Image: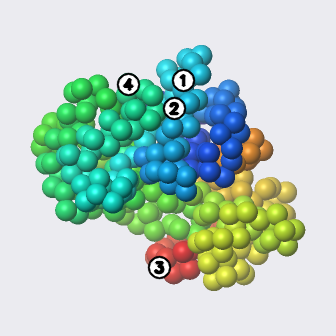
């Protein structure tokens, strides 16, 4: 396993981050526990979740599954860098959402109870809250750090200027501020290259790329649909994007066949090769998916392959589509 510093901090995290969106939902609890063990055995020390995950059963259910795994002992908690998120509604109550100081602190304590742990390593703002002043947000986060309930603060789904505004406010308070930004980044969704990643690099903020396969679109979608084995690809934004960009995806799968490379592994290897990217957040449902992610980490892409990929999925501003032109 490869490890990298999380942004400008001294914390070292695996370059594969175990995303937990599927745990207990698209797989049983027993399968989820086994998958987390497999990830840890392979050297993945970075687990990511959110307080809302598992909403298909009940909000917070995924944290409960992770808490069940941590309770098995064996040094699991000490070996894992655990991240969760706050922002999304946890009930219909008006103050049970967003980034008010009240909700940040209450949501953190609720996550700690569900996870069965004393601390969260990376507490991430799931979205920006335009109604919350940064002074209020940072006051709450500082309180949680001082109480030992969180170690670092991250963000998710921010724009570049949000990172700047947040970090400048933290600097004025002499607070560490944002250490990581989790954003969607893959071959068909490259708009973060324009401003977000340069801003993150300038401020020493690590980039965690979620949805490196764009919901399964880049994992051999056409082949799986033809074989009748598609799961995520046959629904949601992946299907919408496939209908708009079918020809490009077909050419991409031809390139992978020529290179004798699995499409999912090439797509993940490409994101891992991008400047500024600390880790990719992978959401495996099977042990085989996790093995594929590890092979992607070991893959090296030469300049010719990178150039051919850029011709298929050109960067925005260099012939590529505007953000969300067909990727969503």
Q: Nearer the viewer, residue 100 or 46?
A: 100
Q: Could you tell me residue 91's position as x and y percent?
A: 36, 55
- Note whether residue 272 is visible: no
Q: Which residue is pictured at 53% across the width and 68% down the height? A: 189
The residue carrying mark 1 is: 71
- The mark nearer the N terminus, 1 or 3, is 1
Coloring applied to the structure: rainbow
Above or below, comparing residue 197 to residue 194 in the picture: above
Distance of label 1 from label 2 (alpha carbons): 6 Å
In the rendered structure, the answer to whether residue 193 lies left or right of residue 232 reads: left
Q: Nearer the viewer, residue 25 or 19?
A: 25
Do residues under tags 1 and 3 come within 8 Å of each other at their CB atoms?
no
The residue carrying mark 4 is: 118
Q: Could you tell me residue 113's position as x and y percent?
A: 40, 32
Residue at the right extreme, as displayed? 227
Q: Could you say whether the residue bearing mark 3 is in a helix, strand or loop? A: loop
In the rendered structure, the answer to whether residue 215 lies left or right of residue 131 reads: right
Above or below, comparing residue 130 to residue 57 in the picture: below
The residue carrying mark 3 is: 322
Quadrant location of residue 247?
bottom right
Q: The C terminus is located in which quarter?
A: bottom right
Distance of label 4 from label 3 (alpha carbons): 44 Å
Q: Which residue is pictured at 59% across the width and 72% down the height? A: 237
Crowd tier of the residue under label 4, counting other residues whose Cα lies within 10 Å: few below 14, some 14–19, many 20 or above: few
Q: Which residue is pictured at 69% across the width and 36% down the height? A: 30
- The mark nearer the N terminus, 4 or 3, is 4
Quadrant location of residue 215?
bottom right
Distance of label 4 from label 2 (alpha carbons): 11 Å
Do residues under tags 1 and 2 come within 8 Å of each other at their CB atoms?
yes
């Amino acid at each position: 396993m490869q490890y990298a510093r999380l942004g400008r901090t001294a914390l070292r995290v695996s370059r594969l981050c175990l995303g937990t969106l599927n745990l207990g939902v698209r797989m049983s609890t027993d399968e989820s526990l086994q998958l987390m063990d497999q990830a840890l055995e392979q050297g993945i020390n970075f687990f990511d979740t959110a307080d809302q995950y598992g909403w298909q059963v009940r909000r917070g259910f995924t944290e409960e599954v992770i808490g069940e795994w941590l309770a098995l002992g064996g040094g699991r908690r000490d070996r894992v860098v655990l991240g969760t998120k706050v922002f999304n509604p946890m009930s219909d109550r008006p103050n049970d959402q967003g980034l008010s100081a009240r909700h940040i602190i209450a949501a953190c304590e609720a996550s700690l109870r569900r996870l069965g742990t004393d601390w969260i390593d990376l507490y991430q703002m799931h979205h920006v809250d335009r109604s919350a002043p940064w002074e209020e947000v940072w006051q709450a986060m500082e309180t949680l750090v001082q109480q030992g309930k969180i170690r670092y603060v991250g963000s998710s789904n921010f724009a570049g200027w949000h990172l700047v505004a947040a970090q400048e406010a933290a600097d004025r308070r002499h607070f560490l501020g944002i250490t990581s930004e989790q954003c969607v980044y893959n071959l068909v969704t490259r708009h973060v290259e324009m401003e977000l990643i340069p801003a993150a690099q300038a401020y020493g903020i690590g980039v965690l790329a979620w949805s490196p396969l764009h919901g399964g679109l880049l994992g051999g979608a056409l082949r799986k649909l033809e074989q009748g084995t598609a799961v995520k690809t046959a629904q949601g934004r992946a299907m919408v994007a496939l209908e708009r960009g079918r020809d490009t995806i077909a050419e991409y799968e031809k390139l992978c066949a020529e290179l004798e490379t699995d499409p999912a592994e090439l797509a993940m290897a490409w994101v891992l090769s991008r400047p500024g990217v600390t880790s990719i957040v992978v959401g495996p449902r099977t042990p085989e998916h996790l093995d594929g992610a590890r092979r992607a980490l070991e893959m090296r892409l030469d300049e010719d392959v990178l150039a051919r990929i850029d011709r298929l999925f050109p960067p925005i501003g260099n012939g590529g589509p505007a953000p969300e032109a067909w990727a969503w």
